[in-house]
Image (cartoon, rainbow, N blue to C red):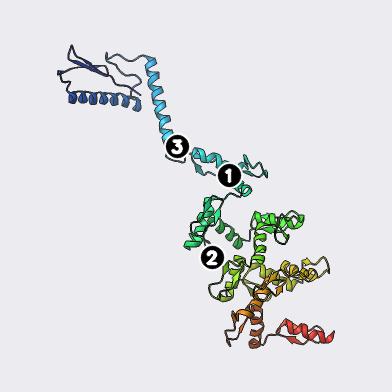
Amino acid sequence: MIYCFLIVNKSTDAVTVCGRHWSVQVHQSRDRETEKQLLSQGRKEEEEVGDLFNTRERRDYCGSSGEPQQPHDAEKAKKSLSTSEHLKKNQQRSKGKRTHCCSDCGKRFTSSGITMHQRIHTGEKPFGCTQCGKSFTQSTSLISHQRTHTGEKPYSCTQCGKSFTQSTILISHQRTHTGVKPYSCAHCGKRFTSSKVVKVHQKIHTGEKPFSCSDCGKSFLLSGQLKSHQKTHTGEKPCSCDECGKSYTTYNNLLVHQRTHTGDKPYCCGQCGKSFTQPHNLKSHQRTHTGEKSYSCSQCGKSFSWPHTLKSHQRTHTGQKPYSCDQCGKHFTQSSHLIAHQRTHTGEKPHSCAQCGKNFTTSSQLTTHQRTHTGNNPYSCTQCGKSFTQSSHLISHQRTHTGEKPYSCDQCDKRYSDKRYLIKHQKIHA
């Protein structure tokens, strides 16, 4: 920085600006306009000198005497230039310019961003939770995680009052009210409210399941799914119901269970009014109205609404029944079927009808029963218009139109359209 000095000598009527002398008339009133002009001229002189340093056309410059400045003055000038360059760099940083390049992937970042990014390559997680020992790459991620221990949820939705631990989760949630789905899948075009959900969904197309169990080798899309699964090996069930004492591996499973006590079914079908305890059950049900069945069996061509339903079906071809009852040894293709079966041993019927008090072993049995009170038959045949309380009854009925009889007796080869009729028939042989 080069300073300019203005000296007014009243006795000689002279003014000195930046080492040069100017002879002027100074009135008793101290003409302010004249002083301003002199200052302006002095600044021009300063700029001219500064330009000499910036263009580096001269290594030395002349002072008021016209003689070259001494070497130490030139060093000061260089130092001033160096300070100016540092100032420019700092201004670039403050404007958010990405001046730092990652040597591993070539991505560019700001000075603060490059440090956090490189932890992805090094695996460094310097911020650790004192309660559970989990580590994070950023301090903000640790703060969000600690709220899972404290229960703090500072971000709440103004429309429904639901609270969240992170502002980003609140923003995604608010889109469920507005209907905005800004993220779409490149494979099928399906739209989502969150970029994270899109990434998980796309793995369905690629078949990628990066999280595998070290005990049984089963793979999962999400790390949370793997953690929940691993508890089936350890037998750990940390979440217990205050009303009946039943324990669960995850907090979400506990919440779903508690709805059997409260009768709460917050997810309602807009077409038939049927309510569900879980959102995925509602989505599955809605496909009975749309007829969408995206997952088909490669062996028999039968289509299903969900991939897990297809997997259960495929076991009818392979004969695989991985879920066995520890009391009677009976095997099942699905874990839900095993749970329902085990209640035949315990006598437990946790699902109660609010109208007549009748109890049932499964929620689906209760739902079907409740239709006897409401008269609701949501499943209707497109050919004859006949309606049914259950989708399985509709499927059996439709076989009367197609003539299909998939259930055969292994003793007399008699065939039936409904499995219930086959079971009734087999009692004749017994």
Report how far apart the C-alphas of labels 1 and 3 lie in the structure.
Answer: 27 Å
The first of marks 2 and 3 along the sequence is 3
**In this view, 12 is above or below 165:** above
Residue type (three-letter) at the residue carrying disc 2: Cys
Q: Check disc 3 and give the amino acid type.
A: Arg
Q: Give the secondary structure at mark 3.
A: helix
Which residue is the site of mark 3? 93
The residue at the point 28 percent across, 25 percent down is: 48
Image quadrant holding the C terminus, namely bottom right
Q: For residue 257, which quarter of the picture?
A: bottom right
Residue behind mark 2: 188
Residue 234 point in image, percent of width and height: 76, 54
Mark 1 → mark 2, Cα distance in angstroms: 36 Å
Give yes or no for contact between labels 1 and 2 (Cβ–Cβ under 8 Å). Answer: no
How many marks the image carries: the answer is: 3
Q: x%, y% of residue 270?
A: 53, 72
Of tags 2 and 3, the one toward the viewer is: 3
Label 2: how many Cα within 10 Å (few below 14, some 14–19, many 20+): few
